[in-house]
Amino acid sequence: MYVKIDVLKSLRDAPGAPENRDPNLVFVATPDILVEPARDAKGVKYDGGFVFNPGAYAIKIYATPSSIKINKAADGDEDAVGITQGLEFAHPGDEVEINEFQQNWLGKSCVAFVKTGDCGTGAPFYKVVGSKCTPLQIKFEGQNDNDATKNTFKLEAFKKTNRVPGFYYGTLTFATVLVTIAADAETVDVTSGSGEYQLTDGSAAAIALTDLVNGSHGDVITLIGSGGTYPSTIASTEAKFALLEAADWTANLGDSITFQGFKNGATAADILWIEKSRQ
């Protein structure tokens, strides 16, 4: 449960300045979401990872950075106050792809993820607008004249909720993974940062993974199982991993496991990978 605490001025420099956001917004159609994680006891942070149906994935759409606006408003009668969530942004140009998006997502329910916290302001995370129960729907206007060529989007939840937009520290499934790991690798190089890494079946034996190397504090890494005859394994006894309830993990087809990096020593290599979720 939430324990009442003081909310003082943030120690971050200029906390009232606009947030740094990734201009590539992420959209997921709600029918593609198999598992929407619960929020923690304080009601804002997601505790666990989003899991999509087999073959389903999220898409990205570029938004003019200065146009991105996350909306939240609480209103209603005395005993019926609810929160309405929304998202606005502009996409430059009027190419066929953005018109196809408008045509084929019109009337569809979705959830939006806005990556926040890059550019030296701390570990990135997603602000999640909408949910499976209170999804967003897309409205848009096109401008193609002497002043500009762009499409302006306004996503609204037609149903109120009792939740503000959530904070999500996990990863998402896209059409392609960041990196595919070679067969028989005992470590996974995560230089590419937070995201999904596809494991490969061993060539002659199941390989025990011992570490995720070249990572940083706060990175969120998801390993995707390969299946096959010799899938990789992670043992609860490995010093670099902290597995939930000391349960070993096997990289079976369709399975995944998500870790977050925690720097527990003085050097860059002193990263402990703490399990956040698995499927």
Image: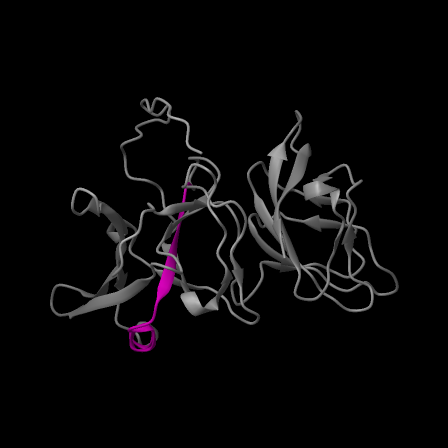
Report the quarter where the N terminus lies: top left
In the rendered image, residue 250, in percent from the top left (x then y), is placed at: 75, 56
Q: Which residues are magenta?
A: 99-117
Tell which residue pokes out farthest to the right in this image: 204
Report the quarter where the C terminus lies: bottom right
* Residue name at image x 42 percent, y 40 percent: 119
Image quarter of residue 219: top right
Q: Is residue 212 visible?
A: yes
- The residue lying toward the viewer, choosing from 175 and 128, is 128
* Residue name at image x 37 percent, y 64 percent: 110
In the rendered image, residue 85, in percent from the top left (x then y), is placed at: 28, 52
Tell which residue pokes out farthest to the left in this image: 146
Q: Is residue 260 above or below residue 53?
A: above
In the rendered image, residue 273, in percent from the top left (x then y), is placed at: 66, 40
Is residue 174 shown left or right of residue 30?
Answer: right
Q: Is residue 162 above or below residue 254?
A: above
